[in-house]
Amino acid sequence: THRLVSADVQFKDLGLVIIDEEQRFGVEHKEFLKRIRATVDVLTLTATPIPRTLHMALLGIRDISSLTTPPQDRLAIRTEILPYDERRIREAVLFELNRGGQVYFVHNRVYNIESIATRIRLLVPEARVAVGHGQMEEGQLEKTMLRFLAKETDVLVCTTIIESGLDIPNVNTMIINQADIFGLADLHQLRGRVGRYKRQAFCYLLLPPDRELVPQAKKRLKAIEEFSELGAGFKIAMRDLEIRGVGNLLGREQHGHIAAIGYDLYCRLLEKAVKKTKKQPIVEPLETHVDLGLDTWIPEDYIPDLRTRVEVYRRLTGCRAEDALDDAQKEVLDRFGPLPAPVEGFIRTMRVKLRAARWDLASVSPGKEGMIAKYRDRKKAEELRKRDPEAIRIMDAETILFVGRDVADLLQPPAPARK
């Protein structure tokens, strides 16, 4: 536990620190462990890394590995967001009880958790209801949990004390009250307490009917509902990074947005600094400029919120491969509906840019007879021309002319070599 970072604890020969549930540790605790010995290796484990840690990994400051393969026969947890509705609560509890299962009802307010439990008993008199929270006496809490584990109670009304460490295969319905007050990582960790076996699990996120949701809460809830497939922890962490910001890599803040110089410039500067520290060569990427003569922008009436428009713009321009661009296009279509012409033009331009970069083209733009491209590598230009000598013509030492066919089709990436 955190006891290891106390001043009176001395290590004889510390070489490896493994931090499980990394999101529960503060920056100072983790840095203290690393300072104990200059050569200490640190392995952190978490389903949902905090924005600061994830960002450091994405920039190359830390190595990262992702395990996305679920255990055999596991099913994705069905997640539903709905206003507080006692009829739905009763239906959900009875459904689980009728198939021999148990239920977590999460209410993260100790002062009125007993009244919530009483309400559940009145709603579902058929259920045996128990209460568990961190302020109970240790022996009492242990007895409550052991009785629940032994299936002597059906519904456990509890706080986030169950968030980690519990593995009870018979509990396959979770109801989270006032879900808007929870962080994205908390919601994902809580949801992971059900669906621990091959039975279909359900997670209901209840919202108070008399309280307006703040924009960040709406984003969190949409993300937890959207990313419900198995192994979605990394995607949730990425969305958490987008919502909360990357934090301060040199200070204590584990989230927060960089306002002074802008996120993209900050990332480029930091990446250069990391490579310089590691004595790695700093190579400026060769840009490929593409102009297809299309409208390429995101209309305000399609995505009214400015911040969201910027997020979508960064999502699309940040794609480094076509499959990533396809995923981003599907996400935009799913979130905002059919693509207007300027957005289609934007995505088409990005697709041509990715393909042109594969052929080492410096630019693609309209000409009098067709599309004109400037190439850097003569060998690749000759290879490209062989695909269709009539439609792809090398004009001089730096220019290619595309005529008669769609430039996106002509720039299809080379087929992988057969083994």
Image: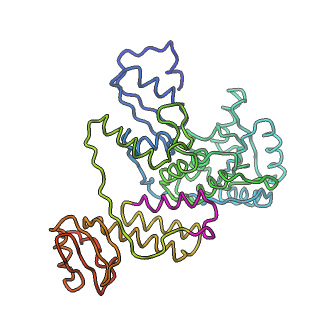
Residue 404 located left or right of residue 328: left
Question: Could you say where residue 22 lies in the image, as x and y percent from the top left?
Answer: 50, 36
Q: How is the image coloured?
A: rainbow
Residue 58 located left or right of residue 91: left
Q: How many marks?
A: 0
Q: Which residues are magenta?
A: 299-319
Question: Is 307 contained in the magenta span?
Answer: yes
Q: Nearer the viewer, residue 284 or 131?
A: 284
- Residue at coordinates 72% horizontally, 60% vertically from top-left? 82
Q: Nearer the viewer, residue 211 or 299?
A: 299
Q: For the C terminus, give its image quadrant.
A: bottom left
Residue 95 located left or right of residue 259: right
In the image, is residue 378 above or below residue 387?
Answer: above
In the image, is residue 30 above or below residue 296?
Answer: above
Question: Is 301 contained in the magenta span?
Answer: yes
- Residue at coordinates 39% horizontally, 75% vertically from top-left? 292
Q: Hey, which quadrant is residue 393 in on the image?
A: bottom left
Q: Hey, which quadrant is residue 13 in on the image?
A: top left
Residue 274 located left or right of residue 86: left
Question: Could you say where residue 142 lies in the image, as x and y percent from the top left?
Answer: 66, 31
Question: Could you say where residue 134 lies in the image, as x and y percent from the top left?
Answer: 69, 32
Question: Could you say where residue 34 lies in the image, as x and y percent from the top left?
Answer: 41, 25
- Residue at coordinates 27% horizontally, 80% vertically from top-left? 402
